Image: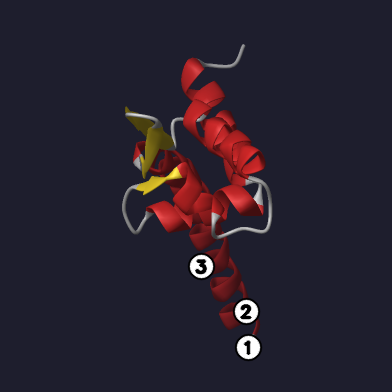
Amino acid sequence: MVSIQAQRRDAVFRALADPTRREILGILRGGRRTVGGIARNFRMSRPAISKHIHLLHEAGLVETEKQGTTSLCSINAQPLREVDDWLRDYAAFWSESLRSLKRYTEEKR
């Protein structure tokens, strides 16, 4: 059985798997943008960009706010912290593996 936290993390990984969505997050790091403002950075239709933003929103990475007829998008970095925590476990594993390799090679000298 997969935990809710693991499901959320999986949704974030799926969202980050696409280069266009990663680029959208990069744009939003600079501050809030309208969907049209984001779309101007790409050679694809605005509806296609809206679909990418929707997937980012579902993963919790983008928050949208309606202002009249426009939607303002902003980044929500909290889900990235959860992914970072998950990756840190593997960084610790690799650090220990590298220390073991170093000890092994030093003993073989």
Judge whether residue 38 can be spotted in this image: yes
Circle 2/circle 1 CB separation < 8 Å? yes
The x, y position of residue 26, in whole percent, is: 46, 57
**Relative to 95, does residue 20 appear above or below in the rendering?**
above
Q: Residues within 10 Å of mark 3 (few under 14, many from 20)?
A: few
In the orientation shown, which residue stands out farthest toward the top?
1
- Residue beneath the point at 52% across and 16% down: 3
Circle 2: residue type:
Thr
- Residue beneath the point at 32% across and 29% down: 68
State the residue position of label 1: 109
Instruction: Identify the disc placed on residue 105.
Output: 2
The x, y position of residue 56, in whole percent, is: 52, 36
Residue 42, image quadrant: bottom right
SS class, disc 3: helix
Instruction: Identify the disc placed on residue 59.
Output: none
How many numbered marks have been drawn onto this rendered protein structure?
3
SS class, disc 2: helix
In the orientation shown, which residue stands out farthest toward the bottom?
109
Residue 41, image quadrant: bottom right
Q: Which one is earlier in the sequence, the residue at label 1 or at label 3?
A: 3
Q: Residues within 10 Å of mark 2 (few under 14, many from 20)?
A: few
Q: Return the residue nearer the eye: 80 or 54.
A: 54
Residues at marks 2 and 1, CA–CA distance in whole angstroms: 7 Å
Judge whether residue 93 can be spotted in this image: no
Q: Quadrant of the N terminus?
A: top right
Q: Residues within 10 Å of mark 1 (few under 14, many from 20)?
A: few
SS class, disc 1: loop
**Relative to 85, does residue 95 appear above or below in the rendering?**
below
- Residue beneath the point at 61% across and 44% down: 46
State the residue position of label 3: 99
Circle 1: residue type:
Arg
